[in-house]
Image (tube, helix red, strand yellow):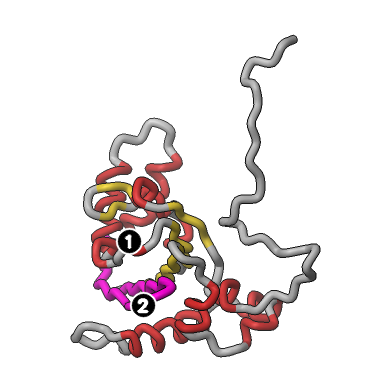
Amino acid sequence: MLLGNGTPTTAVAEKVLRRMEQSRARNLKELLPAANETISIPSIQRQLKPGTGLIEFWVSGSAAAAVYITSNDAGVVKAGISQAGLSAVQELAGALARRHSTNWRALARQVSENLGISRIPIHQASQWLIVADGVLNRIPFEVLEHEGKLLIEKAEIAYLPSAHLLAQRLEASPTHRRRWPWELTMSAFADPQPDS
């Protein structure tokens, strides 16, 4: 495996990112012209606004990895994940779906540990774009923990199906610009008790 046993370098993160993106859904590649282009950490970094980062996850039956990218840093975090760890992801999704579940926090802590969330430098950005893989698509990353706090307490979280969406060059006219799902599109104020 690309990750080996040593500390991964940025060059390793680049290779891991490319492999992750190559494995994304074929129909996404058909929809996005840029999805067939080779993706790179610098191409993503050019698209990230200051204070925004991207984390792309990959899971298999026995291993997990996360490539994190900010405008000035990148790296990869590797983690071993057992069948019990994958089951914890499923259990967390179920616990969150139940209205009065009390064990979701312990499950979130376990999933966070299994994915190596504590080794990702969350402090480097106030907003993180998450590209989840497989079973990880079933959970909201906002409830995962980093240094004893929920991720939502440390940063805004948004989701992408692929990092190619960020790396692609969008051709937009000056009068009509495409907005990303994580960008503010409207601010509204209202009187909660209007006169009747």
Where is residue 65? Give x, y as percent: 33, 74
Q: Which residue is mark 2?
A: 74
Disc 2 packing (10 Å; few <14; some 14–19; many ≥20) = many
Kindly report the secondary structure that dominates the magenta region of the rendered protein. strand
Where is residue 32? Give x, y as percent: 68, 78
The residue at the far top in this view is 196
Q: Amino acid at mark 2?
A: Ala
Q: Along the line of sight, which residue is nearer the eye, 195 or 166?
A: 195
Q: Amino acid at mark 1?
A: Ile
Q: Is residue 93 magenta?
A: no
Q: Is residue 64 magenta?
A: yes
Left or right: 140, with 30 as reference point? left
Q: Is residue 115 visible?
A: no
| Mark closest to the chain's N terminus, 1 or 2 | 2
Q: Check the picture and name the quadrant holding the C terminus.
A: top right
- Above/below status of 9 relative to 173: below
Q: Which residue is mark 1?
A: 122
Q: Check the picture and name the quadrant holding the N terminus.
A: bottom left
Disc 1 packing (10 Å; few <14; some 14–19; many ≥20) = many
Q: Which residues are magenta?
A: 63-85
Where is residue 90? Give x, y as percent: 38, 54
Q: Secondary structure at mark 1?
A: helix
